[in-house]
Image: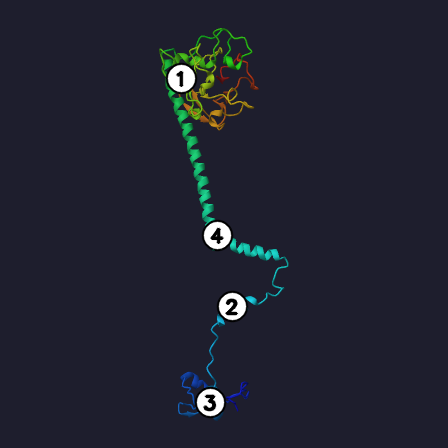
Amino acid sequence: MLNPDSDNQEIPQKPLADHEAAYIDAILEHGNLDHTGEQNVDNVACPPRLTEIIHALSQLPPVEPPADLTRRTVAAAGAVAIPPSVLPADKSMLTNTRLQRRIWDPRKADIAVMLVAAALLLTVTIFQLNKARTLAVQSSCANNLALLGTAFGQYSATNNGLLPSEVIPADHNWLPRSMAPQLHRAANAHCNLADLSPMLNAPARYSSWTRMICPAVAGTSTTVLFNPAEDHPVWSSIGYSYIDQLSDYHHHWGQAGHVAVLADRNPLFYGGGAQQVNMNSWNHNCLGQNVLYDDGSVFWTRTPDVGPMHDNIWTLGRPPLRVYSGVEEPASRYDIILVP
């Protein structure tokens, strides 16, 4: 028997009979339990033992959960200690794991991906801009040489197809005076570039000396400097090297396109530092050089070995010389050198 006034009420542990279990199922299904404990489900009387149990349960006061049950539950869960077997032996691993979780938070990961993508895009954009600028300068230089090729053609048409040249100086030295101050030079000595004077000076003037400034170096040399005592410019203000005109081999314009006539500056005489005979012109950061040939064509080449003989246009002889005094001569008609 249950005592409603007792704090510790016990319910007999005797299993329910089949008819008692069926009656309870019917009550749960219909939900018609009243406060008296008297039940009549489908006109079936409630078994006496169940009547006593139901009556006792109906006397119990309603149970209301504490207002701070949620807070107390969370606090209790946080106070539960993690078993030592679950933690790593090295406590720094736990810290690193938490740090990694913070680093690879989805929002932070998205921001990181966007930053990396932006950096890559900026790098590619700068690279493409630099590449476009380099190609533009190369193209402008090639166009400049093509216009000089037109001037060569006009000059040769009235000069028996010859390339422009001055009277050969008595000392046969094609180096500028400033590059060989220790040498005794003749009074009428001039550098090889002076041989362009008949084409670029008055009265003919098929072009101008400013055309001889390569666009690649125009930012540092925008003015052609002239020697007050002569009618040709200071060689250091010129951006191209011209085929040696002081040799015994005289080339003509309008030929098969195998002879290099004009090109970016010869690196053995410009740029300073340790120059090598197989390096490219300094004009285009040693990436290559534009070359004007004797038929008016202009080609960009990544090596100074050009023409059908793969001749190095910076040097003379085989093996090539590295240092010049200005009196060296080509070994053959196909041994071309472009000099100041």
**Mark positioned earlier in the residue sequence (4 or 3):** 3
Number of the front mark, 4 or 3: 3
Do tag 1 and tag 4 residues touch (Cβ < 8 Å)?
no
| Residue carrying label 2 | 74
In front of the other: 69 or 42: 69
| Residue carrying label 1 | 209
| Residue carrying label 4 | 109
Q: In this view, does 185 lie above or below 9?
A: above
Local crowd size for mark 4, using a 10 Å CA cut-off: few (<14), some (14–19), many (≥20):
few
Q: Is residue 60 above or below residue 255?
A: below
User: Mark 1 and mark 2: span between their CA atoms?
Assistant: 89 Å
Residue visible at 53% across and 68% down?
75
Local crowd size for mark 2, using a 10 Å CA cut-off: few (<14), some (14–19), many (≥20):
few
- Residue 331 on image: x %, y %: 53, 14
| Residue carrying label 3 | 55
**Mark positioned earlier in the residue sequence (1 or 2):** 2
Which label belongs to residue 340?
Answer: none
User: Mark 1 and mark 3: span between their CA atoms?
Assistant: 122 Å
Q: What residue type is labelled 2?
A: Val
In front of the other: 50 or 133: 50
Number of the front mark, 4 or 2: 2
